[in-house]
Image: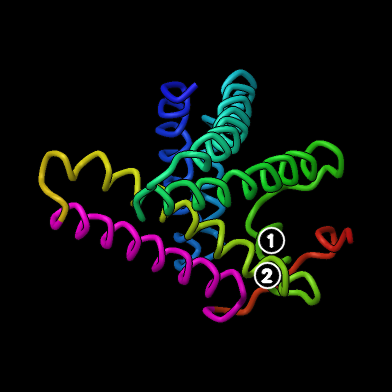
Amino acid sequence: MKNLHKISGIIVSVFITMHLLGHSMAWFGIAKHQELLVLFRKIYYIPIIEILLVLVFSFQSISGIILFFKLRKRQNKTFIEKLKMYSGLILALFLLQHIPATIGQRYFLDIDTNFYFAARVVIQKPWLYYFVPYYFIGIMAFAVHLASVHYQKISIIIGSKKARFHSYIILAIFLILAIVILYVFMGFHYKITIPNEYNVY
């Protein structure tokens, strides 16, 4: 399971990074975000690829929770190991909510999960009180997990000092992405008018 978790983790990491970079392009306008979204969807909306991605994300989340409870029993864990464990658990819980929610909205409510779908819940009350910290914590849990895994792998090769610097760079990049994405989607960069068809609840 551990080896499969690593393989699925690479796929998940690449997808999430591309997904966040796509969201950050909304800084240059809603049209730019939608343009990139359409481009990405040409790949991951292919039925077999979408099914495989859902399976990979599901396995990554569930196996991550199982590994968390296994590792929790181990004595004398390092600070980095604890960071990896708890950030992985938070990320797994985030994905287990986020993936079914987005797919469910699309298939059962026939809502396009585009810019307005994401922006609505971080603009409108009371949803923003939950979804602003929800998205920020989700992004930073991914960042901490990625940084801690990278540290463990690379410190053996380049030493702990340089590996720690790498980790800080990773955290800084995703912190900036999180701030930029939320700043734009919350309507601080330009005015956002949510179409009526997205006000389904």
User: Where does the image place residue 130, in percent across and percent down from the top left?
Assistant: 72, 68
Q: Residues within 10 Å of mark 2 (few under 14, many from 20)?
A: many
User: Where does the image place residue 12, in percent across and percent down from the top left?
Assistant: 48, 36
Q: Which mark is residue 122?
A: 2
Quadrant of the frame with the C terminus: bottom right
Amino acid at the residue labelled 1: Tyr
Name the outermost residue toward the left.
158
Amino acid at the residue labelled 2: Val
| Residue holding disc 1 | 116
Q: Main secondary structure of the magenta part?
A: helix
Q: Are marks 1 and 2 in contact (CB under 8 Å)?
A: no
Residue located 36% across and 55% down the image: 79
Dot 1: element = helix
For residue 105, what is the image quadrant?
Answer: top right
Q: Residues within 10 Å of mark 1 (few under 14, many from 20)?
A: some
Q: Which residues are magenta?
A: 161-189
